[in-house]
């Protein structure tokens, strides 16, 4: 009997390889300088080889702990992919002037500018920062809940959330936006209040990161959010709001799985998170609206996309295409 020596890829690994291929193509088109392009493509080649190694080990030793590590590795890579969007889009024209302009037409003012000024109380500030920081808790908490309660549904859940992140990252690369906390500070708060929104070009790619404090509070959650932003935040990823989009998608997936009690448990935290994105000036209100819309769109295509990646033998093709893209840009 002929033995099958093929490597089995998890759906999350296939999806990550797909993102590597698509983002490599985008880098090749944008061409952010030869040195930067080679560095970014080199990272992709090394990560691809790492995925191949993990998949090979997992195929030879089909153990639950190895499968868990493989999924964990794909999720952990998000911490690398996110700041990398700025490494690519900082060479392009910043689009915050468009977002601020849309905001001004909708409201006649900037909600992100006046929200915290109208509600400066320390307890409100702490509540908002707690909500914003709970983004990580929602992802981890619901993810672990499905992992231990319904392993089959977890695979679909993880695939859908991971895919949503990847789509957002592609948008952030081709549509660079920094968010109010960076843009207002760059153009001057007097201009933001007066409805004057100049185009900055690639300002954030050539200047130090500057933000403005919206409060004098220095509570526990305020400091947690501030520390997290200092470590991993970049002037990127404002539109659409992934905080709103991903958390909304997770809430929809809870309803889809008929986990109503868990939905009710997480909903208050989710609601505060959505409000907090504007309060702490991480996002414009139009970013929030776009987050809602994209979350619904991701859910709508999640099942057919999951079925395709689960059954189609896409991994080998994507690996070879990614390597070809890398060689073509050497």
Image: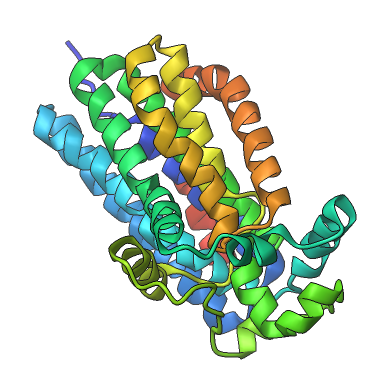
Query: Whole-percent x and y of residue 55?
Result: 25, 39
Q: For this rendering, which residue is in front, 184 or 78? A: 184
Query: Whole-percent x and y of residue 73?
Result: 26, 48
Q: State the residue at coordinates (68%, 34%).
A: 293
In which quarter of the view is residue 192 placed? bottom right
Query: Whole-percent x and y of residue 65?
Result: 10, 34
* Residue 316 seen in the current view: no
Q: Is residue 6 left or right of residue 32?
A: left
**Scheme of image coloration:** rainbow
Q: For this rendering, which residue is in front, 90 or 59? A: 90
Q: State the residue at coordinates (31%, 65%).
A: 224
Q: Is residue 108 left or right of residue 113?
A: right
Q: Is residue 141 left or right of residue 97?
A: left
Query: Whole-percent x and y of residue 261?
Result: 33, 15
Q: State the residue at coordinates (68%, 75%).
A: 183
Where does the C terminus fall, quadrant-wise? bottom right
- Please tell me whether residue 125 is drawn above or below residue 271 in the rendered image: below
- Please tell me whether residue 29 is drawn above or below residue 288 in the rendered image: below
* Residue 65 seen in the current view: yes
Q: State the residue at coordinates (75%, 62%).
A: 110
Where does the N terminus fall, quadrant-wise? top left
């Amino acid at each position: 009997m002929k033995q099958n020596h093929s490597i089995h890829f998890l759906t999350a690994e296939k999806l990550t390889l797909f993102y590597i291929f698509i983002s490599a193509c985008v880098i090749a088109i944008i061409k952010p300088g030869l040195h930067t392009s080679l560095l970014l493509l080199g990272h992709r080649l090394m990560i691809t080889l790492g995925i191949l190694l993990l998949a090979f080990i997992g195929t030879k030793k089909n153990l639950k702990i190895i499968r868990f590590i493989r999924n964990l590795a794909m999720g952990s890579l998000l911490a690398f992919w996110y700041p990398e969007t700025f490494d690519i889009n900082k060479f392009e024209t910043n689009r915050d002037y468009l977002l601020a302009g849309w905001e001004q037409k909708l409201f006649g003012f900037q909600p992100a500018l006046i929200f915290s000024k109208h509600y400066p109380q320390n307890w409100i500030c702490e509540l908002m920062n707690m909500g914003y920081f709970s983004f990580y808790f929602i992802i981890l908490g619901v993810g672990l809940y499905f992992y231990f309660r319904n392993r089959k549904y977890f695979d679909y859940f993880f695939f859908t959330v991971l895919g949503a992140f990847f789509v957002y990252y592609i948008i952030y690369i081709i549509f660079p936006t920094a968010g109010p906390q960076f843009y207002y500070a760059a153009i001057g708060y007097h201009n933001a209040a007066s409805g004057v929104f100049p185009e900055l070009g690639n300002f954030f790619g050539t200047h130090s990161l500057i933000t403005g404090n919206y409060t004098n509070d220095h509570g526990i959650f305020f400091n947690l959010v501030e520390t997290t932003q200092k470590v991993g935040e970049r002037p990127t990823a404002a539109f659409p709001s992934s905080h709103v989009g991903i958390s909304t998608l997770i809430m929809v997936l809870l309803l889809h799985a008929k986990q109503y009690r868990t939905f009710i448990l997480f909903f208050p935290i989710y609601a505060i998170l959505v409000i907090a994105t504007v309060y702490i000036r991480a996002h414009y209100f139009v970013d929030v609206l776009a987050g809602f819309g994209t979350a619904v769109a991701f859910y709508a295509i999640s099942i057919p996309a999951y079925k395709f990646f689960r059954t189609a033998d896409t991994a080998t093709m994507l690996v070879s295409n990614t390597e070809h893209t890398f060689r073509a840009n050497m």
